[in-house]
Amino acid sequence: MQQAIPVLSAPLAADLSPLTRHLWAEKIAHRVVEEGDQQLLLVADPADVERIGELLRQWDNGELGEPQVVQTNNPDGLLQRAMRMPLTVSLILLLAAVFGWQHISPEWHTWLQANAGLWPDARNSVSTYLNMGFWELWRPTLLHFSTLHLLSNVLWIWVFAGAMERIGERGPILAVLLLSGLAGNVLQWWLAGPAFGGASGAVYGLAAWTGLRQTRFKVPYGIPPALLGIMIMFMLFTIVGDTVFPGLSGTANGGHLGGLLCGFLMAMLWPLPNRGNNDA
């Protein structure tokens, strides 16, 4: 495997984002990694080193503007994008299928009563959650109680999971969905007992993952940086509202908060691919 080539060493405080945006616009494979108190810009192809010399000079002189948007005659349509994101599309179809099943069968009602008799007396016992098991705790993630509820979560899955899948992070998508969904459901069950549902905990996990790794590790998801902040503000608003006026929003705030915290933790602990000594 070809070793990545360092072309720039800069202090951690330096903003390399204008430079990396130009490199992605030029389709130059690269990665930014940290070593000590420096951040290194690595490129995969030796042929690109000479190409980016002028960009490095402009960046160093503070003359580097935004890359020009190249208009193409055949922009990708929705179908073309979906074909490049089979996992994301499959997740959306799964949620839609479960939503349809909810309208033709009452069996899902039992999912809302997971060990209801144990809450609240046994909610502080670890054995309660171990006895319930992964599936019983996680499966409310698949349930949605209105079309708007479903469409909202599907939209965010398309945005966050789609951005991850476009750069090859299919394994992390599944890991975040499973673990953030579980963490959010456990916290929600602990706070308020059973009778909740929705993929919002997993969505907040995906938002935390992409937001932190894009900002901290310069992973190029292409998601507006302010989006995570907006979602956190919305969560805080519903938490405060439901604290002052219980039941005001009808939101499973524990699910949101648990998923968010789990997503942040996973984003910090999950290793970066191709870090340090291989191609970008």
Image (cartoon, grey):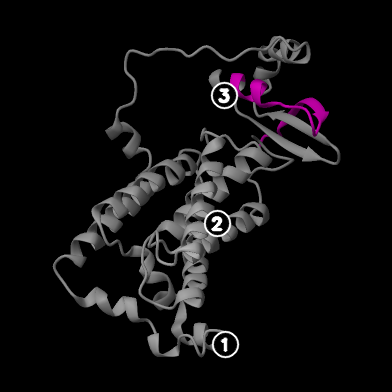
Residue sitting at the far left: 104
Could you tell me which secondary element the residue under label 3 belongs to? Answer: helix
Could you tell me which secondary element the residue under label 2 belongs to? Answer: helix
Task: Write down the quadrant of residue 71 in the picture.
Answer: top left
- Residue 101 located left or right of residue 246: left
Residue tagged 1: 125
Residue tagged 2: 260
Q: Residue at x 50, y 51 (%)?
A: 206
Residue sitting at the far right: 37
Q: Which mark is residue 68?
A: none
* Three-letter amino acid code at the position of disc 3: Trp
Q: Residue at x 58, y 61 (%)?
A: 262
Q: Label 3 vs label 1: CA separation?
A: 50 Å
Image quadrant in which the N terminus is located: top right
Give how far across and how far down residue 162 sits, in percent: 42, 42
Q: Label 2 vs label 1: CA separation?
A: 23 Å
Mark 3 or mark 2, which has the lower sequence index?
3
Mark 2 or mark 1, which has the lower sequence index?
1
- Marks 3 and 1 close (CB-CB < 8 Å): no
Image quadrant in which the C terminus is located: top right
Q: Which mark is residue 24?
A: 3
Pick whichever, 154 or 238, lies toward us.
238
Let me know if residue 95 appears in the view: yes
Nearer the viewer's eye, disc 3 or disc 1?
1
Q: Which residues are magenta?
A: 1-22
* Three-letter amino acid code at the position of disc 1: Ser
Q: Label 3 vs label 2: CA separation?
A: 29 Å
Residue 3: within the magenta? yes
- Marks 2 and 1 close (CB-CB < 8 Å): no
* Three-letter amino acid code at the position of disc 2: Leu
Q: Is residue 71 above or below residue 198?
A: above
Q: Is residue 8 above or below residue 124?
A: above
